[in-house]
Amino acid sequence: MTLHSRLSALGIFTILSGCASNTQPTPKLHHALLTAPNSQAVSRVIERLMHIKNIKLADDVFMHSSTFTLKNTNRSDITANQQRNFPDQFELMINNNRCYIRHLDSKATAEINSVTCSINPSN
């Protein structure tokens, strides 16, 4: 390995390690439950996260459990351009009195407004 190659490798390592040390830790999210039913607000967030429309949810979604599975959602399969059913799992999370819905597979997370939630004591 030439001196130039060694210096280049050292420079890249230094840059990468500097980037890694400047990252902020992800805030700790806790499993949560809604304090009052609001299936419409939950639906809007899930529709935005999943790029789908007209989701119908039970009135008590996230009232008894921090997670739920949405079944029979029709979405296009990009490679085959066909409709397929994919069950999707979501969880309600809280941090600093702000509520979030997270898609378990993609980890896509969005804040849910117009609701209040509290830490789920059973998780």
Image (cartoon, helix red, strand yellow):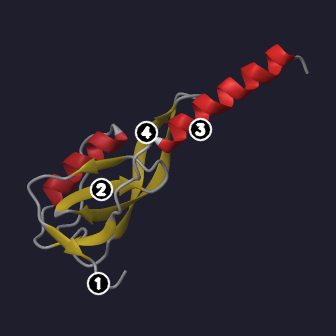
- C-alpha span from label 1 to label 2: 18 Å
- C-alpha span from label 4 to label 2: 20 Å
What residue does disc 3 label? 17
User: In the image shown, does 105 or 40 lie closer to the viewer?
Assistant: 105
Mark found first going from the N terminus, 1 or 4: 4
What residue does disc 1 label? 121
- Residue 101's disc number: 2
Q: Secondary structure at mark 2?
A: strand
- C-alpha span from label 1 to label 4: 34 Å
Say which quarter of the image contains residue 115: bottom left
Q: CB under 8 Å between callouts 1 and 2?
A: no
Pointer 3 local density, CA inside 10 Å: few below 14, some 14–19, many at least 20: few
Image location of residue 33, percent across then percent down: 23, 73
Asked if residue 105 lies left or right of residue 46, the reply is right
Mark found first going from the N terminus, 3 or 2: 3
User: In the image shown, does 54 or 106 lie closer to the viewer?
Assistant: 106
Image location of residue 119, percent across then percent down: 25, 75
Say which quarter of the image contains residue 75: top left
